[in-house]
Amino acid sequence: MRKIIVLSFITLDGVMQAPGGPEEDPSEGFKYGGWRAPYDDEVGGKEVQKELEQPADYLLGRKTYEIWASFWPKHADIWPGINKGTKYVFSKTMKTSDWKNTLFIESLEDIKKLKNLEGSDIQVWGSSKLVHLILKNDLVDELRLKIHPLTLGKGKKLLADGAIPAAFTLIESLVTPSGVIIANYKRAGEVRTGTMGA
């Protein structure tokens, strides 16, 4: 069984929309595209590079896929693996693409089947609606978060109403010189409760 790993750049209030640039995703009037750039530093860059070098397949929502398909095929020098790995695109409307190693799926059952196949782990980048769906259905094995020290108040968020109660264990963390908390969590069973001081 393959792991599904969600990787996300987020703000303190959980916004994940358009970290890379002003034109990345201005939908719904979002005006803070590129909010991640002031926090880039060598330490954070090395951590992201390690993730890019891991063999993986990719599960992407339609909008994220469209953004990526216009950029990554021409920038394989930065991320060679993105062209080699299979891109599974979750969409009911998009059916074809010129980007090699792209397959289209359209149901939760399709995602479950992918997870149960042999092969590389499956990374999910961006794709907020897709992330909400797989969190709601307990299909996420790991969260790899880069938490940036700012709030934006509005924008697409990593977590939404409907995520199931779930416990996670911190398996790795560090803080970059610019104040980004890199925290990797793995799924750890049910939520436990208790009384403080008992």
Image (cartoon, rainbow, N blue to C red):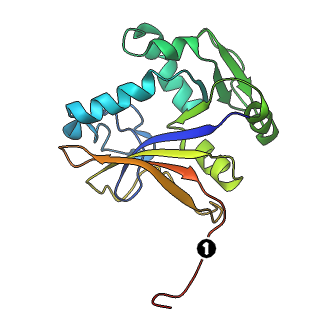
Q: From the viewer's perspective, is residue 34 above or below residue 119? A: below
Count of numbered labels shown in the rendering: 1
Q: Nearer the viewer, residue 131 or 123?
A: 123
Q: Nearer the viewer, residue 98 or 173?
A: 173
Q: From the viewer's perspective, is residue 61 above or below residue 78? A: below
Q: From the viewer's perspective, is residue 2 above or below residue 178? A: above
Q: Nearer the viewer, residue 6 or 119?
A: 119
Q: Secondary structure at mark 1?
A: loop
Residue drawn 64% across the image and 62% down it: 162
Q: From the viewer's perspective, is residue 165 above or below residue 197? A: above
Q: Residues within 10 Å of mark 1 (few under 14, many from 20)?
A: few
Q: Look at label 1 and name its amino acid.
A: Arg
- The picture places residue 136, in percent across and down from the top left corner, at 67, 55
Q: Is residue 53 left or right of residue 94?
A: left
Does residue 160 appear in this view?
no
| Residue at the front extreme of this rendering | 198
Q: Is residue 178 left or right of residue 155?
A: left
**Label 1, on which residue?**
192
Q: Is residue 166 left or right of residue 47?
A: right
